[in-house]
Amino acid sequence: MNRTPFPPHVMIREPVRRMMTALLLVGSFAAFGLFGGTALLVFFTVWAVTVAYASFRSAQKQLRDVEKERARALKSHSASVADRFLFAQRQGWQYEASSAELAEGFGRITQEVPDRLPEEQEVVARHAAQLVAEGVLRGRIDGFNVTVFDLEMINYDDMHELKKRCRYRRAAEASKDYLTVCVVELPVRLPYVASAHLMSHDEEAVRTADVEFARFLLSRPSVRESALDPEYLWSVAGDRLLACTVSNSGLDVPQATSLATRTAAVAAAFPWPELERFRLPEPDEPPRHNLWVFPWEPPVDPLFGQRARRWDEQPVGHAGLRAFRSNPAWLDTKAPLEDPTR
């Protein structure tokens, strides 16, 4: 779950806030009545300094608590990665501790990041340039080649809250989470379409490279059933079926294999003989994917529905740099589209 927003300071919670306000008024009148205007000014100054110092100490404690939680998450992730190695040995799967090549197209962006940049731009651009896939598992499920790996991503919601308490670089480090990605290799290269399109009424989000393909695939009962689950979002991108989830410490082995098994089952439900007419040629450039993620504790809005996030490459500043960032998208789970291409 998100580490922020933080609960309000105790001094601004009810009924403490009312008590503090009453004490301020009583103290002000007493200081002015007994000692005059100078005493009142001194009283206000001492009060303001005390409140500011208490707020500063509280903010620093919140920052330290987040950093401790991040340290625990790192330790837990290291243990999960070690378990993946042991699982691969037992099951005859392939394991790789890290892979820069695999991260290409999933957030790793080859780019030269100059030193003289605003700190915020430098941090996110350099993070994208150095991103690697971690704890890589490769195996075979239901006749499909499956790959599962973690990406250490910046949680921008947390970072924007934490940067009020420290430098941007420190905030970014404390805000990192893990995006666990499952890739199922498909026998046919197909146009892009995402299951979230069935629940999104955003015209920008429902675009697909092939209207007929999107309508055909997402109207098949077996495929449509999996596409209507807002807590499990997947997408077809060329010869890959993609699904991912986000967490503070990555997925353990049972969770990772469960995600892989479920995604392979979606691929097995595709009507493959009928999809041959949608086959695409080999692309001229390596694909760059966007990833749909259902967040930990998504808000539910009576008007818009539930919120998901879509990760994709976005520009950073005006120097031509990019970073892999997320955008919110609302999913209407109560009124899915009958025609996903509308």
Image (spheres, helix red, strand yellow):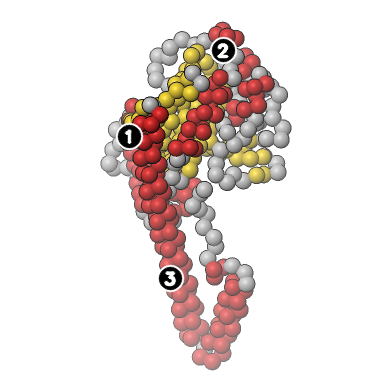
Q: Earlier in the sequence, mark 3 or mark 1?
A: 3
User: Split into 4 quadrants, where in the image is the C terminus?
Assistant: top right
Residue 303 sits in quarter: top right
Q: Secondary structure at mark 2?
A: helix
The vertical placement of 314 against 30, above or below, is: above
**Callout 2 touching callout 3 (CB < 8 Å):** no
User: Where does the image place residue 164, in percent across and percent down from the top left?
Assistant: 44, 56
Q: Which residue is mark 1?
A: 97
Q: Nearer the viewer, residue 24 or 251?
A: 251
Q: Callout 3: helix, strand or loop?
A: helix
Which label's residue is closer to the chain start, 2 or 1? 1
Give amino acid for label 3. Tyr
Q: Is residue 274 left or right of residue 102?
A: right
* Location of residue 221 (image quadrant): top right
Front position in the image: 252 or 288 = 252
The residue sitting at 49% across, 18% down in the picture is 143
Q: Residue at x 40, y 52 (%)?
A: 72
Label 1 SS:
strand
Q: Is residue 21 visible?
A: no
Q: Which mark is drawn over residue 53?
A: 3
Q: What is the three-letter code of the residue carrying label 1?
A: Ala
Residue furthest left as drawn: 115
CA gap, disc 2 and disc 1:
34 Å
Q: Which mark is residue 272?
A: 2
- Residue 192, given in percent of the width and then of the height, sits at 53, 20
Vertically, is 44 above or below 225? below
Q: Are marks 3 and 1 in contact (CB under 8 Å)?
A: no
Quick one: label 1, few (<14), some, or many (20+) residues within 10 Å?
Answer: some
- Specify few, some or many for label 3: CA neighbours under 10 Å numbering under 14, 14-19, or 20 or more: few
* Amino acid on which disc 2 is placed: Trp
